[in-house]
């Protein structure tokens, strides 16, 4: 590894020219990239932002799904959509985009990226994506929206979606996460990507008076594509949340507690491989237990606050207990090479357990520098 477990670059990393110019593995680029991503993760985590409240009504899929522009339909007698309801529905999509961009801007500010325009959408409640209207109202004849104007509207919506994807991509890249997955080809014009511009969209208009309504657009076709947009919004919200809560890589230590030690409550020990914070403890039963048993972690005889599990009597092999993630606390700070004591209460009369300790290495802070060991 280019960086050893204490966070220091090894002395012989750049002994060969290839490592200086290399972009992967032991390359200087790879090391600097890792440090920058760690710094970015530290910055966004310190924001302490809760997940977005997604009331869009969409269901996040595995990737951004393709949207089909509703085709021409004969709405002379029925099946069309009112202009007002189509425009209102489109506005709810833009409102959702505005909420996502507003949240993304909080990360962009601490990452030095510069704020992105939120566009004409309205953020009614900070951090909350309101419902995306996917049920437009029925109309017919010259009262129905024309396909030509609806097509322009959807083209604009897809271009704005593309901008939001690019925005989320930039933040995900900064913290070392993969780009937003997209099904098929990228939709939308790329003209607004420079500056992540979120311009107003084209409003739908009615079929021209005095002309045939065969150039209308079907209500059902509009609703179907709004459903897809709401699903894409849900996915973008999830992917942004993932980036803003991106945690540092964790170190995991496993320790076995054999039957004799488990029954007697005899402590077992492990050594921390790094400076950091003990964040979590999990246990898995290796042999069925008799009698309940409580496990905890101590550092220099001081219990780590919140890190304890109780293993129920008659637990079967494979049963897992979890302390849950522990917030920052002075008792959880551990030093490289420090002994960690896993204690038992001595009440079980049978069983064997494996414990996994999760440590968050100390965060990179201050000046961007590498310590050479």
Image (cartoon, rainbow, N blue to C red):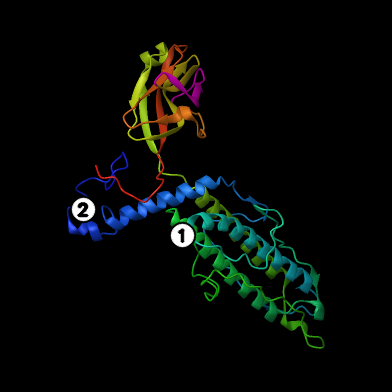
Does residue 4 lie above or below 337 as drawn? below
Cα distance, mark 1 to mark 2? 30 Å
Query: Can you say which quadrant of the picture contains the C terminus?
Result: top left
Q: Quadrant of residue 29?
A: bottom left
Q: Quadrant of residue 260?
A: top left
Residue at mark 2: 14
Horizontal relation, residue 267 to residue 323: left or right: left
Residue at mark 1: 179
- Whether residue 352 is visible, yes or no, is no
- Which residue is pictured at 50% across the width and 46% down the height? 45
Query: Residue 162, percent across and down?
Result: 55, 68
Kindly give the residue lying farthest to the bottom in the view shown: 210
- Which residue is pictured at 58% across the width and 47% down the height? 49
Kindly give the residue lying farthest to the left in the view shown: 16
Q: Is residue 107 magenta?
A: no
Which region shows up in magenta?
Answer: 300-320
């Amino acid at each position: 590894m280019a960086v050893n477990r204490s966070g220091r670059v090894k002395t012989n990393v750049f002994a060969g020219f290839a490592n200086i110019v290399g972009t992967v593995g032991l390359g200087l680029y790879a090391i600097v990239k890792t440090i920058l991503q760690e710094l970015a993760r530290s910055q966004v985590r310190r924001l302490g932002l809760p997940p977005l409240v997604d009331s869009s009504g969409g269901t996040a899929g595995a990737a951004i799904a393709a949207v089909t522009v509703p085709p021409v339909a004969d709405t002379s007698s029925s099946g069309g959509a009112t202009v007002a309801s189509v425009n209102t529905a489109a506005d709810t999509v833009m409102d959702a985009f505005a909420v996502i961009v507003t949240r993304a801007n909080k990360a962009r500010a601490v990452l030095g990226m510069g704020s992105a325009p939120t566009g004409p959408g309205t953020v009614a409640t900070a951090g909350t994506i309101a419902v995306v209207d996917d049920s437009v109202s029925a109309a017919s004849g010259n009262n129905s929206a024309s396909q030509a104007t609806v097509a322009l509207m959807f083209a604009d919506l897809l271009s704005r979606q593309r901008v939001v994807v690019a925005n989320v991509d930039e933040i995900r890249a900064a913290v070392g996460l993969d780009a937003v997955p997209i099904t098929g080809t990228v939709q939308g014009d790329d003209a607004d990507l420079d500056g992540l511009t979120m311009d107003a969209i084209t409003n739908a208009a009615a079929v021209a008076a005095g002309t045939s309504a065969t150039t209308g657009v079907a209500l059902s076709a509009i609703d179907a594509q709004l459903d897809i947009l709401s699903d894409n919004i849900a996915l973008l919200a999830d992917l942004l949340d993932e980036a803003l809560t991106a945690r540092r890589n964790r170190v995991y230590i496993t320790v076995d507690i054999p039957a004799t030690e488990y029954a007697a409550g005899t402590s077992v020990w492990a050594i921390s491989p790094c400076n950091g914070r003990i964040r979590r403890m999990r246990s898995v039963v290796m042999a069925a237990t008799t009698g309940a048993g409580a496990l905890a972690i101590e550092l220099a005889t001081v219990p780590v606050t919140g890190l304890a599990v109780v293993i129920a009597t008659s637990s079967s092999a494979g049963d897992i207990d979890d302390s849950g993630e522990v917030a920052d606390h002075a008792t959880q700070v551990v030093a490289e090479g420090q002994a960690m004591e896993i204690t038992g209460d001595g009440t079980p009369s049978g069983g064997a357990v494996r414990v996994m300790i999760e440590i968050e290495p100390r965060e990179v802070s201050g000046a961007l520098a590498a310590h050479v060991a």
